[in-house]
Image: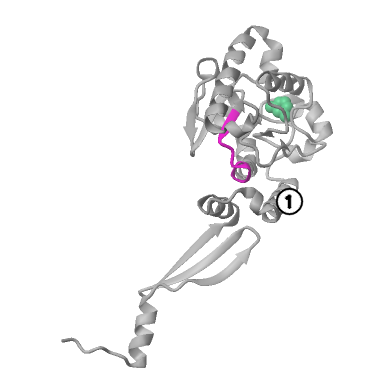
Amino acid sequence: STPIKSSAASDVYKRQRQSCPVLCGLVTNRLQLLFSHRGIIIRLTLHYNRFLTNRLQKAGLSKEKEPERMNEAWTELKQACAQCRRCGLGETRHHLVFGDGAEDARIMLIGEGPGEQEDLQGLPFVGPAGKLLDDMLEMIYLDRTKVYIANIVKCRPPHNRDPQFVEQKCCSEWLRRQIALVDPAIIVCLGRIAATALIKDPFRITREHGQWFDVNGRRCMAIYHPSALLRDTSKRPETFVDLKTLQREIYARCPEVYPDA
Ligand code: URA
């Protein structure tokens, strides 16, 4: 039979062969682990925001159980976004329009970019399109306390032109991190530009509004942008049907949104 080795050298050898995690760095939103496995060094970087959300979900905990850490993550994200000068839009804006609503909402609405009123007030959808959006939400018993609203770009494009592809790309990290923190079950894209950026490219808004798409485990739908509905009222009946489709999905996926139903 094979003799059992019990020498100190053998123990050291055995320990070296085992994977041995070593904490080597903890930055605000990043955790680095170094593993040594059979002489090979493996570095693992965990991004804290995603790690936190996933860990809480897997542990069956709600985000409310970790309010301080969620608040810290939001504060860090807002500060980083406010300092962003990746594209030229930051030079001409009056205010950053980061987002508004419930930071733990089950439903997220995403527009294309701030207009004049939003730029002046620093809040999304507070101009004429925003008033119509509030009315649309009311039709399905929602308001800004039940949703989170953000935009593809956070700074107003001059003269309300469409945000350019490069501007959308420069801004995409902020929206990606907002979505990770809110962690909504349902995302509603307001208009073609948001749908193209988040659902699929190209997106044919006239044909594909009101349809559901699964994107990264979330239910996503696009509806006409409220500005388009202000310009062309003939699109409103179709949008009403889309809103009712949305309402049914909310009942099915997150009935807690309608506690009295
Ligand atoms: N249009 C948008 O797409 N977003 C706003 O915040 C306002 C108008």
| Residue at the far front in the pictured view | 260
Residue drawn at point x = 82 percent, y = 36 percent: 94
Residue drawn at point x = 38 percent, y = 75 percent: 18
Choose between 65 and 183: the one closer to the eye: 65
Q: Quadrant of ligand 1?
A: top right
Q: Which of the 4 image quadrants contains residue 89? A: top right
Which stretch appears magenta? 179-188
Q: Is residue 243 left or right of residue 92?
A: left
Q: Amino acid at mark 1?
A: Thr
Q: Position of residue 135 (x, y in %)?
A: 73, 19
Q: Is residue 197 above or below residue 51?
A: above
Q: Is residue 108 left or right of residue 79?
A: left
| Residue at the far left in the pictured view | 1
Q: Position of residue 16 (x, y in %)?
A: 39, 80
Name the residue beneath numbered marker 1: 75
| Residue at the far bottom in the pictured view | 7
Q: Which of the 4 image quadrants contains residue 112? A: top right
Q: Is residue 193 above or below residue 51?
A: above
Residue drawn at point x = 52 percent, y = 54 percent: 59
Q: Position of residue 76 (x, y in %)?
A: 71, 53
